[in-house]
Image: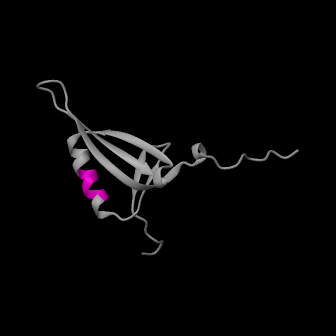
Amino acid sequence: MANVRQPVTDDSIKVRQLSHYQFSWVAGDPGKPGTYTLQLVLDQGAWEEVLTLDPDDADNLQDLLENTSTVHYDIERRVLLFGVTKVGE
């Protein structure tokens, strides 16, 4: 009998498109720096991810997200992929 793969499930999808995002800042202990987080809403809410960032990463990511129309996120590797370019362009 052939080994038939199971149907696609939410957990089997490894790369999703970013639909919405939200930056947050959480205060640290008195005298200590706070923590930035970035919540990613993927595939219109089918998946969510929260990333903890340092201030420089938060600033750079905000610039990239504002200036890129299509962003994907590789869930397994935790990688944001910015833009889509056709081969040869």
Q: Quadrant of the C terminus?
A: bottom left
Looking at this view, name the residue that lies furthest to the front: 45
Q: In this orientation, which residue lies closer to the viewer: 26 or 77?
A: 26
Is 45 situated left or right of 52 in this image?
A: right
Is residue 11 shown in magenta? no
Magenta residues?
Answer: 60-65
**Image point (29%, 57%), residue name:** 64
Q: In this orientation, which residue lies closer to the viewer: 7 or 1?
A: 7
Q: In this orientation, which residue lies closer to the viewer: 64 or 9?
A: 9
* Colouring scheme, one of rainbow, by chain, secondary structure, one colour: one colour
The percent coordinates of residue 22 (x first, y second) are: 31, 48
Is 8 situated left or right of 81 in this image?
A: right
Magenta stretch, overall SS = helix
Is 59 situated left or right of 13 in this image?
A: left
Q: Kindly indicate the quadrant of the structure image that contains residue 51.
A: top left
Above/below status of 47 relative to 85: above
Is 81 situated left or right of 54 in this image?
A: right
The percent coordinates of residue 39 (x first, y second) are: 36, 44
Above/below status of 63 relative to 40: below
Looking at this view, name the residue that lies furthest to the bottom: 89
The percent coordinates of residue 42 (x first, y second) are: 45, 51
**Image point (88%, 44%), residue name:** 1
**Image point (25%, 57%), residue name:** 63
Is residue 64 shown in magenta? yes
Q: Across the whole image, how many numbered discs are drawn on residues?
A: 0
